Image: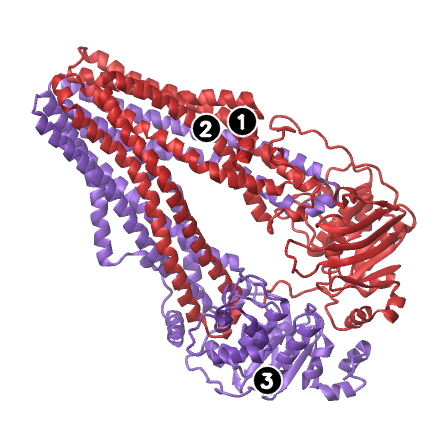
Amino acid sequence: MVSRVRRVIGGLARFDLRRFVIGGLLWLPVHVIPLAGGLLLQRVLDQISGQREAGLGATLWLCAAFVGVELVRGVVMMTAWTYGVYWWDAAATLVRGNVLRSVLTGREPAAARLPDSSGEAVSRLRDDVSGVVDTTDEFVNLAGALLFGVAAVWIMMSIDPVVTVVLVLPMLVIAVLSRLMQGLIRRLHGRARELGGAVTGFVGDVFTGVLAIKAAGAEGAAVERLREHNRRRRDAAVKDRLATDMLDTATGATVEISIGLMLLLSAAAMRRGDFTVGDLALFTLYLSWLTELPRAVGTLLARLPQAAVATERLRRLLSADEDVAGLTRTPGVWFHREPPEPAPAPDGDRLELLEVEGLTARPGNDPLADGGVTDAGLTVPRGSFTVVTGAVGAGKTTLVRALLGLVPATGTIRWNGRPVGEPGLFMVPGRVSYAGQVPRLFSATLRENLLLGAEDGGRVDRALERAVLERDLAEMPDGLETVIGTRGLRLSGGQAQRAAVARALARDPQLLVVDDVSSALDVATEELLWERIARATRDGSGPAALLVVSHRPAVLRRADRIVVLDRGRVVGSGPLDELLGSCPEMRRLWDGHGTLDAGPRTDAGHRA
Amino acid sequence: MVTLTGREARGEATGRASGKPPSVRGLVLGELRPGRRAGVALAVAVVAMTALPLAAPYLTRAFVDEALAGAGTGRLGLLAVWFLAVAVAGQAARLVTAWLASGLAWDAGNRVRERLTRHALGLDMGYHGRRTPGEMIERVDGDVAALTDFAVAFLLDVVAGVLLLFGMLAVVVTIDPRLGAVLLAYCLLLGYGMVRAQRRTVPSGSRSREASAVLYGHMEERLAAAEDIRANGAGEHTVRSFHRVSSAWYRAERRDAFVGTGVIAGTSVAFAAGTALMLALAAWFASSGALSVGTAVLLLQYTLMVRTPFERLIGRLREYQDALAGAARIGGLLAERPRVTAPPAPVPLPENGPLGVEFQGVGFRYPDEDGSGERVLSDVTFALAPGETLGLVGRTGAGKTTIGRLVLRHYDPVAGSVRVGGADLRDTDPAELHRRLCVVTQDVQILPGSVRDNLTLFRPVSDDAPLAAALTAAGLGEWLERLPRGLDTELAGGQRAGLSAGQAQLLALARAFLARPGVVVLDEASSRLDPATERLVEDGVDRLLAGRTGILIAHRLSSLARVDKVAVVAGGRVVEFGSREELAADPGSRFAGMLRQAEVAW
């Protein structure tokens, strides 16, 4: 793990070595310039005390020079920082871009590596990436602090070697102390966070189960339990804070102790006039800056293990066949010019027959999770309309996701008789396109959402008409340029679902795969949608074949063939009439339509 | 003990409901005020942490002046030791203050958390229906933490910082009024300048934060849509658009870095100018013999000390706004009143046995934020004798679930009345109602904790026998025997907690058995269980409904075999109501039509 983090840090330092080195060299003076400030103050005080002969005018000039030195430092700092922002942001973008590319185009299915919530994935790309880049950046700080330290100690030695040696000792003590306490602090911090998580988790559970608690009249007991959680967390949090403050105090106290020691040791020399008031001021000033060095060492030592954990978490987002070097691979960063155009999708690979055998898959990593499929098989010939149906949790969505290579699966898929090696890389446009059950659209124009970078050439209009969106489009304020998605104009559930179908149609696929769209579409609209798509399939201008998940009677009647799933297994396949005779599960599902959830949900706005 | 805290909670709610509305900020800040002894200890610590650092430079002054005057080494050594003691004690005082303050802040924060939780639990289900648990966590924990963190920082940085600055000014004025005047003018100018500079950074800072919000939002959207993007071959295109957004983010960051470091550099120069100014004055006064060298050293140390409190003071300005906003949100939650309230003299429900249920001309619409809303029930009328079981059938959205919610008095109807056990629900005490009415929902919430906690919902029990009996009645008797630590076995919590969907259903039934309600509202699970578990659940439901009034929200016609009465719901109305057998026998009824279509026989 340590060698991995070393490779990532090395990669980040090297991907734009010129900027990293120049940025570092610009930053070093920021640490070193305070040496000059100390020397100036030394002279000023020596002149005030009369230990160095000079007129008042000369002293005032030195005071002005002190301000001038700080001014120079300020200008250098602004230059170095502004220059360094490029490297920092470029390094972060490099890692994020590599992870994103791997998630979206890598060999292994994204579902196998992405954490459960996309928020969690984003926080890795934000915090873990920041952590790794900061750690690399920290080396520059350490170099600066080291340079200052060496020079400062050299100057102090030339003034009074004995006092200097004695003063450096407390610095070493806090370096060791902070190293020792780091483990304890991390442990206490971890414990406080864990107990904090217990409190928020408990509050979340209480309000999720608020109905059960009210029904049991257990409000008081729940608050009592919260109080116990709170008490445990309080103790841990106060300890955590105390330990962190103690380390800070130790650092602050070291400076004070050093100054006290210096006074004690220099008393005799001062009386003799060997150790001047100016020397006293210089030592005082340098001492407080010197604590920067143990702090920089401590920070880096604390950051490295965290960076190793962050690296590991980021690596897990990469495809299994990529190693950690993939995080800092350099396809480039485009802050100043347009990124290059991606290669256009290959032309359609004409579909004659799709065969699936022995497909077994589990969504997520939980082997016990509902909705897996076991040993499923189906065939989709050119020109066919195939419907996958089954009860809630029967594995319909998993079946199509496995077929598309979106979840890890075993089994055989053959495209025109040729076995497909990597469905995730093969079952894509121009062969296959997909509209999922929960449509995911972006905060962008409708046109961008539908094309996703593809050439238009009439695709959009065609797709909009087939997905029955043309009337909705006419009502949008800016037509295709209307910004939709989470932060733009919100589409209704039905519009979003039809937009997802239109997006899939706009890829001009051979096989169109559509997961259940009925949840937000009324029967008439869905009928029209299938009518238009099926007509396009017949006249050869649309997808060559359709694979659709649905439980709507109208769609089942339209299908050439139906695949019935029950608890993850295919329990029947064939035309509807035949299945109604031979497959009990098909009959059960068909009968259920009389009263079951056949209509669009209108109660969805109010949670139970 | 349980009933006591429960009554306390209710008493508090009704007491405040009848009194005048509390001042929101006063209410929250009042909780933060420490007790008398703690307050005194804290004040002493704060004074020590400001006075000691002010005293230390006095000792260096004496040291320098006496050393130059040729004092003995022993005397100088003593001064040095004193300096050591005072300086270290100053650091220790700061540590003690921080420790005291954080302990007090946690105690106060936890009091607010508990109060908020108790208050929110007393609100009606209509309130909770509109809020996610995440929002409640943010109110109960996030906002409170922001507030208490700020309170600690305020004490350590703002109060202590201001005290230190005033102390310093006072000391310098006593040394030389002219120096004091200059230092005061400098501090005022510096403070004004820093606040102005801080304001200058706000626009570029918020632009930069906005740009990162856009960047992370962009990534979040794309990662959430990873499968749509992959399956539609748009991976490379998406990476390209990520690079574009990153470029905009970089430009915002660069601009912010320029402004931000400009302010930092400007501040450093301003502090250097202050140091230089004091030293120049010291040199001037010293040249005329009006000021000792030791005093010059003292002034140098003071000007070096000014920096930290100033920076911390300015830094807290931004957090102040956030903390106030958090306090306002907390106050908003505390000011929230339940829409479903207990009348002054509630009508008691019969303590034991099944209760009748009666709907009379009930109309209902969900309360929207603006008070309007679509009507979901109109003129619903039916009556159920004690012990009878009603099956509600109809499409999703027809109003079945809403009828169930009105029985449980999650809401009050907008027209007509709902009566349970002969009493209009509006005349009953919601807390008592919750004890006599019970609901078993589809999505069972398993809490992290032991099996016992999940049954009792944290109420202390003296005897495990009723718990085991409830589990057995629900059909989980064998399961309980197989558990390694029995009732103390920990469940993981979350959606499934290591239980199968069927076991979770059975656990919910066991909770209902334990409650011994007079009316059970059962929202049947629509997901399919394996046949063995399905039978267990059905048996458990049969036992639960025996001797109780039951309302079954049915998703399968076959489940209706156990009901006495059937209500067919469509478009928010009960379009058919009657005995199941009679309706099934009447070929003209809708219910009989459904049965024919489904070919269900009983």
Q: Earlier in the sequence, mark 1 or mark 2?
A: 1
Q: Position of residue A388 (x, y in %)?
A: 80, 59
Callout 1, which amino acid? Ala
Q: Nearer the viewer, residue B254 or B504?
A: B504
* Residue linked to disc 2: A139
* Residue linked to disc 3: B549
- Asked if B93 appears above or below B203 in the picture, the reply is below
Callout 3: chain: B
Instruction: State yes or no: discs 1 and 2 in contact (Cβ < 8 Å).
Output: yes
Quarter that holds the C terminus of chain B? bottom right
Mark 3 and mark 2: Cα distance apart in space: 73 Å
Instruction: State yes or no: discs 3 and 2 in contact (Cβ < 8 Å).
Output: no
Q: Outermost residue toward the right?
A: A539
Q: Secondary structure at mark 3?
A: strand
Q: Is residue B34 left or right of residue B366?
A: left
Quadrant hosting residue B261: top left
Q: Secondary structure at mark 1?
A: helix
Quarter that holds the N terminus of chain B? bottom left
Q: Which mark is residue A13?
A: 1
Q: Position of residue A146 (x, y in %)?
A: 38, 24
Marks 3 and 1 belong to one chain: no
Instruction: State yes or no: discs 3 and 1 in contact (Cβ < 8 Å).
Output: no
State which chain is coloured red: A
Q: Is residue A54 left or right of residue A472?
A: left
Q: Nearer the viewer, residue A265 or B367?
A: A265
Task: Please say whether residue B81 is visible from this viewpoint.
Answer: yes
Quadrant hosting residue B242: top right
State which chain is coloured purple: B
Mark 3 and mark 1: Cα distance apart in space: 73 Å
- Asked if B494 appears above or below B417 in the picture, the reply is above
